[in-house]
Amino acid sequence: SSGINAEYGVAKSASMGFCQGGCRLELNDMLVYFVEMIDNSLRNSKDECSHMRHISDTVYELIDNVVTYAAEADSVSDVVNFVLRRMTSIPRAWWCGREECVDKLDMKFNSCCSLQMLKKAPNREVNMRRIFGMVNGLLEEEEQLQIKRKTYSMVHKMLMPDRVCDTGVYEQPICDGEAKEAVLIYGYYGN
């Protein structure tokens, strides 16, 4: 019981900066359920859809692929692009990896509030470019990282289930004006 209260307190604090009204409560519930899924993964829960153990094979495969690729890559930039593109396999495994869980994940995480939060978040490509710009500022000119447009595109869509899974597995929620206005990002309303 105290664990759930602590999880809810963290969720409430995290969501205050992103949402207001009903969307804040919905995001709190999403964050709490996500943390519960992590707990259930560690506790070996028997409920098929309440844990994340099914993505462990994807994580191991990602690590194996990266190690193999890095040994043969021509540059650090190639490795970084490969890692970022391969990382998209993790949300794909989570969203699409268990057909019997699609309805539950859809109900818990694929809502107007979550969609609007993702759409209104400051441009992730710009943020990624800033991060890599900062990293490049620490590197010699010949070591600078070059991130490909395809990589930015793949990373951008990896949290949206209707773009990650096969067509028709998830539908993008149809949102009314109230949900669109309830998502507040970094102190301003997105457009």
Image: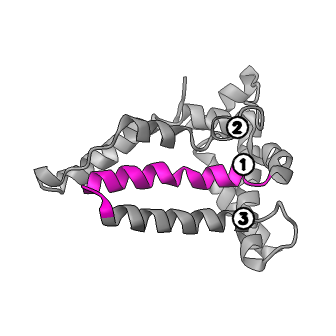
Count neighbours of disc 1 (C-alpha within 10 A) and say few if under 14, some if 14 to 19, many if 20 or more: many
Say which of 115 and 68 sits in front. 68
- Asked if the residues shown at circle 2 and circle 1 are in contact, with their CB atoms under 8 angstroms apart, the answer is yes
The boundaries of the magenta stretch are 72-98
Q: Position of residue 152 (x, y in %)?
A: 42, 39
Quarter location, residue 174: top right
* SS majority, magenta: helix
Kindly identify the residue that appears in the image at 77 percent across and 71 percent down: 40
Q: Position of residue 191 (x, y in %)?
A: 55, 22
Give the alpha-carbon distance from disc 2 to disc 1, as whole Å. Answer: 8 Å
- Asked if the residues shown at circle 1 and circle 3 are in contact, with their CB atoms under 8 angstroms apart, the answer is no
Say which of 42 and 71 sits in front. 71
Q: Is residue 78 magenta?
A: yes
- Residue topped by disc 2: 166
Kindly identify the residue that appears in the image at 86 percent across and 52 percent down: 100
Q: Position of residue 171 (x, y in %)?
A: 76, 31
Three-letter residue code for mark 1: Cys
- Residue topped by disc 3: 54
Give the alpha-carbon distance from disc 3 to disc 2, as whole Å. Answer: 18 Å
Residue 20 can be seen in this image: no
Kindly identify the residue that appears in the image at 18 percent across and 57 percent down: 138
Kindly identify the residue that appears in the image at 39 percent across and 41 percent down: 127
Three-letter residue code for mark 2: Asp
Residue reaching furthest to the bottom: 43
Q: Position of residue 177 (x, y in %)?
A: 72, 21
Q: How is this picture coloured?
A: one colour
Q: Earlier in the sequence, mark 2 or mark 1?
A: 1
Q: Left or right of 64: which side holds 173?
A: right
Three-letter residue code for mark 3: His
- Residue topped by disc 1: 96
Q: Is residue 76 magenta?
A: yes
